[in-house]
Image: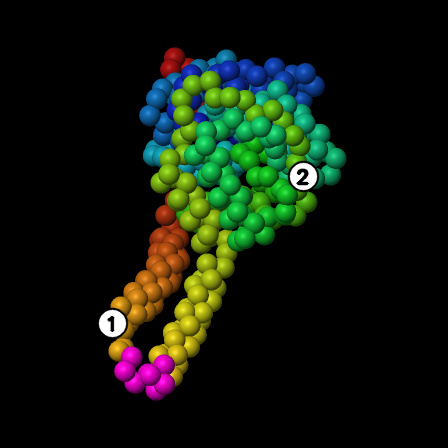
């Protein structure tokens, strides 16, 4: 058996070495063949120099560097395509995901699961990140058919055939969670300790979280379009009933003036619904257009094996 560990790296110049050292120490407890793939998502710090240094320190470490920032899920895709392990583990670069407990995930995979997520009884993320996780979890339940009770985290392990199926996805908008849920329902969980962040802050800004949610909304479900359709039917029905009410009220009370405010409210409500629906349709069409133009999931400009040893 061979284990591959894929880690997207962004702003982790001072933490990634400790993460890799811990992985190496843990894996050698069972002396299993392994590789560690570090993907530099165009980090603004000197993490690429740290990755090249680690590739010289450990033969198992491979490094990939993007030409621009493409996001965590694109970095995972790049790492998966370079991986050769029978079991592939994904984790964070900041040390919050405990590398010394990775065999808990491996053992659950060997017990028969296709994918195993690490879950946390006490999450150490900040309140903004926790809110984002809850919203993402709600979205996965509604739009992607996530099994009830399953906690989705960035620390998980998957069998080779799941990774191969994920790598078949070639469109521009990558969302690994959706790719997993459309590949298997045989998903397990295992509890691990979530550590406090030693330094820095999460790389997920509000804008990045919105973009991530949009990928989940539009790349793997047409439910938003159906929701817009149902809202249109509901508003149209309400408008029709309101017109009947106005006519009956006018016939029964001829002196009642026709309300300008109610007319404007109806116009604004219906107009807002139309714009909302057009926005959803436009988002789908825009993504189709970009996908047809073969926009890349990522662009690799360097690999550790391409660099001279003195670097």
The answer to whether 270 is drawn above or below residue 245 in the figure is: above
Q: Nearer the viewer, residue 161 or 11?
A: 11
**Quadrant hosting residue 30:** top right
Q: Residue 201: percent from the left, percent from the top?
A: 41, 25
- Total labels drawn: 2
**Quadrant hosting residue 160:** top right
Q: Nearer the viewer, residue 45 or 66?
A: 45
Q: Is residue 60 magenta?
A: no
Mark positioned earlier in the residue sequence (2 or 1): 2
Q: Nearer the viewer, mark 2 or mark 1?
A: 1
Mark 2 burial class by Cα count in 10 Å: few <14, some 14-19, many 20+: many
Residue drawn at x 47%, y 49% is: 216
SS for callout 1: helix
The answer to whether 240 is drawn above or below residue 186 in the figure is: below
Residue 4 disc label: none
What's the image's color scheme?
Answer: rainbow
Residue drawn at x 26%, y 78% is: 257
Q: Residue 66: percent from the left, percent from the top?
A: 38, 32
47 to the left or right of 113: left
Mark 2 — residue? 188
Q: Residue 72: percent from the left, percent from the top?
A: 45, 35
SS for callout 2: strand
Residue drawn at x 46%, y 29% is: 126
Mark 1 — residue? 260
Quarter of the figure with the C terminus: top left
Q: Residue 308: percent from the left, percent from the top?
A: 39, 18
Q: Is residue 278 visible?
A: no
Q: CA distance from mark 2 to mark 1?
A: 58 Å
- The residues colored magenta run 249-256
The answer to whether 226 is drawn above or below residue 145 in the figure is: below
Q: Is residue 11 visible?
A: yes
Q: Nearer the viewer, residue 258 or 226?
A: 258
């Amino acid at each position: 058996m061979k284990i591959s560990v894929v880690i997207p790296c962004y702003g982790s110049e001072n933490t990634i070495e400790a993460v890799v050292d811990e992985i190496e120490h843990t894996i050698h407890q069972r002396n299993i063949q392994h590789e560690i793939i570090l993907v530099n998502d165009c980090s603004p710090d000197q993490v690429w120099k740290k990755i090249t240094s680690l590739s010289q320190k450990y033969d198992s470490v491979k490094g990939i560097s993007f030409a621009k920032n493409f996001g965590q899920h694109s970095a995972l895709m790049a790492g998966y395509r370079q991986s050769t392990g029978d079991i592939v583990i994904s984790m964070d670069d900041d040390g919050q995901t405990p590398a010394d407990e990775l065999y808990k995930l491996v053992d659950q995979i060997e017990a028969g699961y296709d994918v195993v997520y690490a879950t946390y009884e006490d999450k150490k993320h900040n309140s903004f990140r926790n809110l984002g996780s809850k919203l993402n979890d709600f979205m996965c339940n509604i739009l992607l058919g996530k099994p009830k009770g399953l906690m989705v985290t960035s620390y998980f392990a998957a069998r080779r055939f799941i990774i191969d199926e994920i790598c078949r996805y070639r469109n521009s908008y990558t969302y690994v969670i959706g790719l997993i849920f459309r590949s298997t329902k045989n998903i397990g969980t295992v509890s691990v300790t979530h550590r406090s962040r030693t330094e820095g802050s999460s790389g997920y800004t509000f804008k990045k979280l919105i973009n991530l949610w949009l990928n989940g909304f539009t790349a793997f479900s047409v439910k938003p379009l159906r929701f817009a359709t149902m809202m249109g039917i509901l508003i149209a029905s309400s408008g029709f009933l309101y017109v009947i009410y106005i006519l009956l009220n006018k016939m029964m009370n001829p002196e009642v003036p026709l309300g300008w405010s109610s007319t404007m409210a109806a116009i604004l409500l219906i107009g807002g619904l139309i714009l909302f629906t057009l926005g959803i349709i436009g988002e789908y069409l825009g993504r189709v257009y970009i996908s047809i133009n073969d926009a890349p999931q990522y662009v690799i400009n360097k690999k550790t094996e391409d660099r001279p040893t003195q670097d």
